Amino acid sequence: MTRVIGLMSGTSVDGIDAALVEISGSDLDLKIELLAGATYGYPTELREKILAVCTGTPLSMAELAALDDAIAFQFAQAALAIGSGHPPAELIGSHGQTVYHRPLGVKGVRVAWPFGQGFSELKVDRLNVESSSELKVGRLNVVRVRAAEAEGHATRTALPKAWPFGQGFPDNLQPDNLQAGNLPFSNAKGEQPATETNLGQKATLREQPDNLQPDNLQPTNLGQKATLREQPDNLQPTNLGQKATLREQPTNLGQKATLREQPANLGQKATLREQPANLGQKATLREQPANLGQKATLREQPDNLQPANLGQKATLREQPANLGQKATLREQPTNLQPANLQPVTTLGYSLQLGRGEVIAEITGIKTISNFRVADIAAGGEGAPLVPKIDACLLRSSTHNRCIQNIGGISNVTYLPVSQGNWLEQVYGWDTGPGNALLDLAVEYFTNGRKTYDYNGEWAASGTPCEALVEQWLAQEFFKIPPPKSTGRELFSLDYLKQCLGESEAYNLAPADFLATLTELTVASIVESYRNFLPQMPDEVLLCGGGASNLYLKQRLQIRLDSVPVLTTDQVGLSRDFKEAIAFAVLAHWRNLGIPGNLPQVTGASEAVCLGNLYSPRSQHQSS
């Protein structure tokens, strides 16, 4: 027996589900006993910050690190609380809090360049694609692909156009403008100093300043080998001597003067910092506004640099087009045409906050977290990860089952009758929205006074609009064949606002709108079964928060007709803590070196061990 704590917070961000379990067995012989289960809510301010980040609110790296640690602290406190009064746990499996999930690119698709509009032509090896266009959905660009030889559409989401670390690049830059200048960078003060082009040979440029004009960059009488640092604008010192060292020096200094911020008429042998124009030989320049000589080294060079006539062997960062020979470009501007670009990657991306090393440090218990990255590295979606646990704990020798989790996002595991090579026929995918849109709508209609519809009572008092449901089901995600995953990046506040706008034509009351959103969740589940399962299930077992929504459960039963809709409680596994139990099992498997994913579910190239292991420092020190 191994005592393990499983920790999970889903896309609803309701709080942290914690489960203390005793595990026996290793793989398909797994046995679970739930010793304790509880949900620990986030502090209000922390929950609001998490939801803001999930909807794209920018934050600095320092703020991200602080948020990561704050979430980890809450997870650690949940682990300590659930373990209180029980023998010590030997292991913690923490899913963390998902704040961003990007599905992988369809195999064979040229995915979008992440810093611009990307590629206009797609090729898909499993679909015969005739054409493509882009559809704006909230903050995302969703690529709509029209297939000639398959039902439905393949879609992939591109990254937001904004550069994530600042104001970034405008959307309308064209390559001609790049060659002609006009890159919108500014200095630290937001200024755009007027400077010019025609740099000498062997220039190294970093962060060039603003508004350089191409014709007059060559200043008068600058000597060779000039290096500039923080050169002030518009100073016109005449007749500077050779080898001057300048630091704020007044006028008319004699020989061997040391100057800072030197005005005009300096003597000989000066070394310049913050030096105006027209310096003598061997000046050191940074942020030089105008007319550098040969072998100049520039840092923080102004923006809008005209590309013409730059010298050879330039090493560039944030550098526009048509620079001299041997240029190295980093942080390339947006909206470059795809002809000269290669696809970046088809790998997905998923970020969970609440780092395991902090949980291990606070609790003193070995912790495994960051479960999704290994599957993504193997070419998988990184989700869903629970189907193998479902196969171990909920399989049946007599019934084909669907295990339907309804959290913020809904996902299904299809379990065929456990005979023959049944494990290879286990499937799973995200079916679409669960509670996420419903909860957002409740908050919207109550101005934040309520965060969810208890038992679906409000929605049950309304009438669903079937025409809207059919319209919403035309959304591209529902047509993609598995493997597939999604999250708040698609089914977001912006998505809800779009739904609200489309509902205005039907004059729906809030209760009707909630009933219609509930019907979207239910209909997307049932349509997913009909479109992608080898056969309809003999029974459906619900789990997650949506299993407590009685109205949703009733609507699902009506749409599934004769297929019984039950909960996992009815077959011996807690519906409320099943996901937390699953990550306790995944940690157990990682500790034993047993793979936790199913490649046919996630699309990974192979089964891999999931999660990163962190031991508390006390164990490191004792060993």
Image (tube, rainbow, N blue to C red):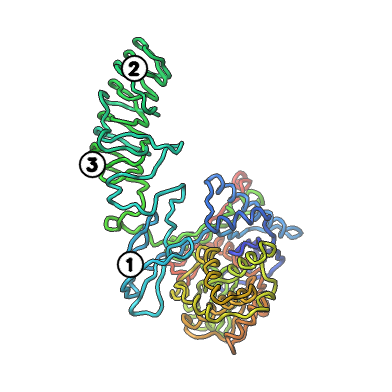
Q: Kindly identify which residue carries mark 2.
A: 244
Task: Give coordinates of residue 325: x percent, y percent.
Answer: 23, 41
Instruction: Please tell me which residue is depicted at 58% across the width and 62% down the height of the picture.
Output: 587
Between disc 1 and disc 2, whose residue precedes? 1
> Looking at the image, which residue is at 63% across and 50% down?
70
The amino acid type of the residue labelled 3 equals Gln
| CB atoms of marks 2 and 3 within 8 Å | no
Q: Can you tell which of label 2 and label 3 is closer to the viewer?
A: 2
Tag 3 residue: 325
State whether residue 230 is above or below residue 611: above
Crowding at mark 3 (Cα within 10 Å: few <14, some 14-19, many 20+)? few
* Foreground residue among 333 and 76: 333
Image spot of residue 355 (x, y percent): 57, 52
Say which element carries label 2. loop
Residue at mark 1 to residue at mark 2: CA–CA distance: 60 Å
* Type of the residue with mark 2: Ala
Disc number for residue 508: none
Looking at marks 3 and 1 on the same chain, the residue that comes earlier in the sequence is marked by 1
Q: Quadrant of residue 457?
A: bottom right
* Residue labelled with disc 1: 122
State the CA–CA distance, disc 3 to disc 1.
Answer: 32 Å
Residue 295 seen: yes
Residue drawn 27% across the image and 28% down it: 219
Classed neighbour count for the residue bearing mark 1: other residues with Cα under 10 Å, few (<14), some (14–19), many (≥20): some
Q: Residue 562, percent across and down?
A: 59, 90
